[in-house]
Image (tube, rainbow, N blue to C red):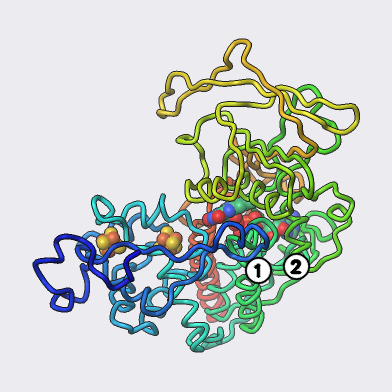
Amino acid sequence: MASSNEPVNSAAGAQAPSALPKMQRFIVQPQQTPAKRAVNERAADFDEIYRGFDAKAAATQASRCGQCGIPFCQIHCPLGNNIPDWLKLSAEGRLEEAYEISAATNTFPEICGRICPQDRLCEGNCVIEKGFESVTIGAIERHITETAFAEGWVRPIRPKRERAESVGIIGAGPAGLAAAEALRQLGYQVTVYDRHDRVGGLLIYGIPGFKLEKSVVERRTAWLIDGGIKFQLSADIGGATPFAELRARHHAVLIATGVYKPRDIGGPGSGLAGIVPALDYLIASNRKGLGDDVPEFESGALNAAGKHVVVVGGGDTAMDCVRTAVRQNAASVTCLYRRDRANMPGSLREVTNAEDEGVEFRWLAAPEAFLGDRQVTALRAQRMRLGLADASGRQAIEPIDGGSFTLDTDLVIKALGFDPEDLPDAFGQPGLTVTRWGTLSINPTSFETALPDVYAAGDIVRGASLVVWAIKDGRDAAASIHRRLQAQAVSSMATAAE
Ligand code: FAD
Ligand code: SF4
Ligand code: SF4
C-alpha cells in the first residue's frame, strides 16, 4: 500500500507534490481511511475497531480538501460544521485553531467523528467523491478533538456570569447534554434528570464500545459535571418523580427522553422464551462491559455465548446486535432482513464490518413463526421479493408463494426499531400534544411544546434518528430557552420599575 504522502495518481507526474498548493491535494494524494483492527483481533473484545489518525496522516488527508466555494460537506452536516476551514487549519498543523472552529458548532465532535454515518452526510456529499473518493472528514474531526483533549485545549465550562434561573432537563442523552452544556455556558443553573444510573443515554447503554468506547462518553460526563451541571440519576420522571414537580422547581423544562418502545413481532410462538428485544440485549452487554453485576447476562437470558443467534432487522441497532453476539462467542450469528442489501436502512459501513466479522445475512426474508416448546428452538422465515415502488420510491415487499425455510436458533433478537412512549400519559399531562406518530409536537422554531415553558428536543421529537441531529436540536432548544428567559427577565425588570 502507498504511504500516506506518496502520490499515486498519474496527474502527479506533471508536478512535484511539494510544488503543489497546501490544499487541493486530492489530485495527487489518495484517500486513506483510519486503520481498522484485524477481524480476529477486534472480534475478541469490545474496543473500537478503528484506530485514530496520527498527526501526519490527519494533516495529509486534510490537505486533500478542494476548499469548495459551496462546500456540500458543510451543507449536509446537520450542525453546519465549518469543515473546509478546520480541514485547512489541520493541513497547516494549526490544530488548536482547528479545534476552536470545530467546537464552535459541535458539542461533541470526537463522538460525531466516530459514529456519524458520514457516508450519508458530510463525506457522502464531498464534491471530490466523484472520481477521487471523499475527504475523510469524520476521522479528521475525531483527531482534532482527541488532540485538543491531550493538549489541554478543551477548556472547562466557566460561565462569565451566573444567572439565577434554573432549567430542568429530562434525559441525559446527546440532546439533553448538548442543551445542558449550552445553557450552562450562559450561566444558567442546570439539572439533568435521567432514569438510568449513568449519563449518556444511548451513547452509554445503546451504542456498543466497538463503535464508541465508554471512556469517551465518561470523559465528557466528567467535563459537564466539572462545569457545574447537576445530574440526578435513577430519577424516573413521571414515575417516582412527578413531572409537575419539575415544572414547579425550574423556570423552564426540556424533555429529551428519546424513543424507547420497541416495535414487536407477532405471530405464532412470538411469546417463547429466548426471544428478546434488542435494547435489553445491548444494555445488558454494555452494563457487563462497564463492570456491573448483570443477572440476565450471567443466567444466559441476555448472553449469546455458545448460541445460534438470529437477529431480525436491518438497521444500525440490528448491526450492533449481530456484532455484539460475535464478540460474545455465539456459535453462529444470522441477520434476517425482509429487503435486500441495497435497501438496508443502516449504514453500509456497519453492514460491511458485520460481514467481515462473520455474520451471515439472509436477505429478503421475514419471520413467519417461532418454533419450540417453552424455549425457542427454530424460526420459520418467509421468503420475500421486492415489488413496485410507492410514491416515495421505496419498493413494496411481497411474500413468495410457498417460499419458506427454517433456521435453528436458541436466541432471537428483535431489532425492528423504536416508537415513542406515551409521554402525556406517563407524565400525567394530557395537554402535552403529540403527532400522529406519538412524538411530541413542538413549534419547530422555538422548540416549545403545547405546555408553557416546556420544550422538547432529540428523538422524542424527530423519532429514532441520529446523535448529530440530537446535538443540533439540543443546542437550538437551549438557544430558544435562553431567548425566552431573557425576555421574561427584561419584562419583570420593566414591571418592577413601574
Ligand atoms: P437518548 O440518547 O435516547 O437519551 C434519552 C435519555 O432520556 C435516556 O438516557 C433515558 O434513560 C432518558 N429518559 C427517558 N425517559 C425518561 C424519564 N421518564 N425520566 C428520566 N429519564 C428518562 N446514531 C448515530 O448517529 N450513530 C450511530 O452509530 C447510532 N447507533 C445507534 C445504535 C443503537 C443500538 C441505537 C438504539 C441508536 C443508535 N443511534 C445512532 C441513534 C442515536 O443513539 C439516537 O438518535 C440519539 O441517542 C438520540 O438522542 P436523545 O438525546 O434524543 O435520546
Ligand atoms: Fe460529518 Fe457528523 Fe462531523 Fe457533521 S458532525 S462533519 S456529519 S462527522
Ligand atoms: Fe473539501 Fe469535500 Fe467539503 Fe469540498 S466538499 S470543501 S472538497 S471536504
Closer-to-camera residue (305/495): 305
At 21% across and 65% down in the image, what residue appears?
A: 28
Q: Circle 1 — which element? A: helix
Q: Identify the mark at residue 290; answer none if there is no mark.
A: 2
Where 296 sits versus 261, above or below?
A: below
Vertically, is 36 above or below 152? above
Residue 450 seen from this side? no
Q: Which of marks 2 and 1 is nearer the N terminus?
A: 1
Category of crowding for the residue at label 2, using alpha-carbon neighbours closer than 10 angstroms: few (below 14), some (14–19), many (at least 20): some
Q: Do the residues labelled 2 and 1 touch (CB within 8 Å)?
A: yes
Q: Residue at x 79, y 59 (%)?
A: 236
164 to 66, vertically: above or below: below
Query: Residue 380 location, x and y as percent?
Result: 72, 23
Residue nearest the viewer, comparing 476 with 174 = 174
Secondary structure state at the residue bearing disc 2: loop
**In the image, what residue type sits under mark 2?**
Leu
Q: What residue sits right under mark 1 in the picture? A: 214
Give the residue type at disc 1. Lys
Report the side of 142 relative to 275 (left or right): left
At horizontal 56% and vertical 27% (from top left) the residue drawn is 364
| Crowding near the residue tagged with mark 1, few <14, some 14–19, many ≥20 C-alpha atoms within 10 Å | many
Residue 129 versus residue 396: which sits nearer the camera? 129
